[in-house]
Image (tube, helix red, strand yellow):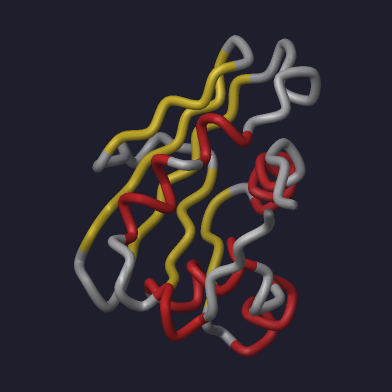
Amino acid sequence: MEYTVSAEQAKNIPLSTFFDAMGPRLNSEKAKNKLIKIGFNITDSDEKFGVIVRNQIAEISEYYDEDYYSIVTVDSNTWKGIVLKTENAVSAIASGKLKISGESIKFLQFSSMFVND
């Protein structure tokens, strides 16, 4: 049985749940010998999240340091939409709904390490 979450339903799910689900979705082979630190600044809720991929593990926290490779600035519903594939990341970047400061290539590498089926 497959269950999908609509964009409307996702609005009621805490953003921390989306980040907590990233760990199990990490493709350990793609993350082998990688160290990538990405910070997330959530504009509409003033939340911050950090994800460090290290030694084939994704460490999730509710903060990030300024030395992270990339800082992603995005509102919570846009990020939820990207995770759920109801919103396209490239379109979000083009429209300014998602902004990446720092090393954009690190964010692209980071994004490719997660299974999203």
Image quarter of residue 46: bottom left
Coordinates of residue 52 in the picture (x, y in percent): 48, 28
Image quarter of residue 65: top left
Q: Nearer the viewer, residue 82 or 13?
A: 13
Label count reads: 0
Instruction: Name the side, left or right, on which 97 lies relative to 115.
Output: left
Instruction: Name the side, left or right, on which 25 lies relative to 51.
Output: right
Coordinates of residue 4 in the picture (x, y in percent): 60, 67
At 56% from the left and 84% from the top, the residue drawn is: 96
Instruction: Name the side, left or right, on which 49 lies relative to 105.
Output: left
Q: Residue furthest front?
A: 1
At 22% from the left and 71% from the top, the residue drawn is: 45
Q: Residue furthest bottom?
A: 95
Q: Nearer the viewer, residue 96 or 25?
A: 25
Query: Eyeballing the image, is 92 above or below 27?
Result: below
The N terminus lies in quadrant:
bottom right
Coordinates of residue 80 in the picture (x, y in percent): 49, 68
Q: Nearer the viewer, residue 58 or 98?
A: 58
Query: Eyeballing the image, is 100 above or below 1?
Result: below
At 71% from the left and 76% from the top, the residue drawn is: 88
Coordinates of residue 27 in the picture (x, y in percent): 72, 28
At 68% from the left and 19% from the top, the residue drawn is: 34
